[in-house]
Amino acid sequence: CPVFDGLYEFCQLSAGGSIAGAVKLNKQQTDIAINWAGGLHHAKKSEASGFCYVNDIVLAILELLKYHQRVVYVDIDIHHGDGVEEAFYTTDRVMTVSFHKYGEYFPGTGDLRDIGAGKGKYYAVNYPLRDGIDDESYEAIFKPIMAKVMEMYQPSAVVLQCGADSLSGDRLGCFNLTIKGHAKCVEYIKGFNLPMLMLGGGGYTIRNVARCWTFETAVALDCTIPNELPYNDYFEYFGPDFKLLISPSNMTNQNTTDYLEKIK
């Protein structure tokens, strides 16, 4: 992990934002809290990992656990949420659910058979996916799986990590989701009407990260926003189309129906 100027202040803001969001939810001062500077799911208790220095998610969940008996954590970043899973691997008070690219891919964890241990056995859920997954395939697994998780686990709060590196065209990613497809996950989880903490995460094609989290903020607020981008200081970054939404690429979806059924 690179060290950069202002690293300590960034960690304070990132972790502080997520904890403050959790406190607001606990005090019932809001129904949804958002920290796009959070979602740093790879950091461990005593080591930085994968561009993550402090695991704001774990700190926020610990805050939520002061008021909530069961919290569900959902991760739609392209990378496995290993730091969060590890922190709560042996407890039944947090259920972690991660949908991620698996197989010769960072961080190399998140096998289907990793299900938790001790009291936490069956409270870690992993969905290892292959390259090129599109909106349709993603929705076909995300919705039924999350419906079952919510039905069986009955959490009273939810933390959703919205890593944008699962979008089509990401510099480090290899999925083929559009912003609308990614945001459908937000919409679906929001539909359970639980106190919800929405966090950022990965995303390496910056213009699309900005697009994605703008759209998902609107989804959280039940707002409709136009596809035409308003003129702003960064307008030229969003050429040549200057639109909010993105199109999928023509990459092959290696997640066959058979494969998705098998892991479901």
Image (cartoon, grey):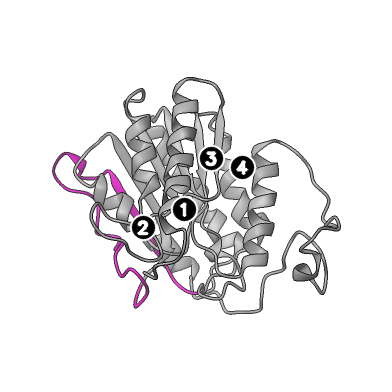
Mark 4 → mark 3, Cα distance in angstroms: 6 Å
Mark 3 → mark 2, Cα distance in angstroms: 27 Å
Mark 1 → mark 4, Cα distance in angstroms: 29 Å
Residue stretch rendered in magenta on the structure: 103-131
Crowdedness of circle 2 by 10 Å Cα count: few (<14), some, many (20+)?
many
Helix, strand or loop at mark 3: helix
Task: Look at mark 2 in the image and give the residue it sits on.
Answer: 53
Q: Can see residue 95? A: yes
Relative placement, left or right, of 8 versus 249 is: left
Give the quarter of the figure containing the C terminus.
bottom left
Give the quarter of the figure containing the N terminus.
bottom left
Looking at numbered disc 4 in the image, what kind of residue is underneath it? Glu
Work out whether 168 lies above or below 88: below
Q: Do the residues labelled 1 and 2 touch (CB within 8 Å)?
A: yes
Task: Look at mark 4 in the image and give the residue it sits on.
Answer: 187
Q: Which of 44 and 123 is in front in this view?
A: 44
Q: Are marks 4 and 3 in contact (CB under 8 Å)?
A: yes
Task: Look at mark 1 in the image and give the residue it sits on.
Answer: 10
Work out whether 244 lies above or below 188: below
> Reading the chain from its start, which is encountered first: label 3 or label 2?
2
Crowdedness of circle 1 by 10 Å Cα count: few (<14), some, many (20+)?
some
Looking at numbered disc 3 in the image, what kind of residue is underneath it? Ile
Number of the label disc, if any, that sits on residue 189: 3
Helix, strand or loop at mark 2: loop
Q: Which of 259 and 181 is in front in this view?
A: 181
Query: Residue 36, position in %: x, y?
Result: 55, 49
From the viewer's perspective, is the residue at label 3 or at label 2 nearer? 2
Crowdedness of circle 3 by 10 Å Cα count: few (<14), some, many (20+)?
many
Q: In which quarter of the image is residue 15?
A: top left
Looking at numbered disc 2 in the image, what kind of residue is underneath it? Tyr
Mark 1 → mark 2, Cα distance in angstroms: 9 Å
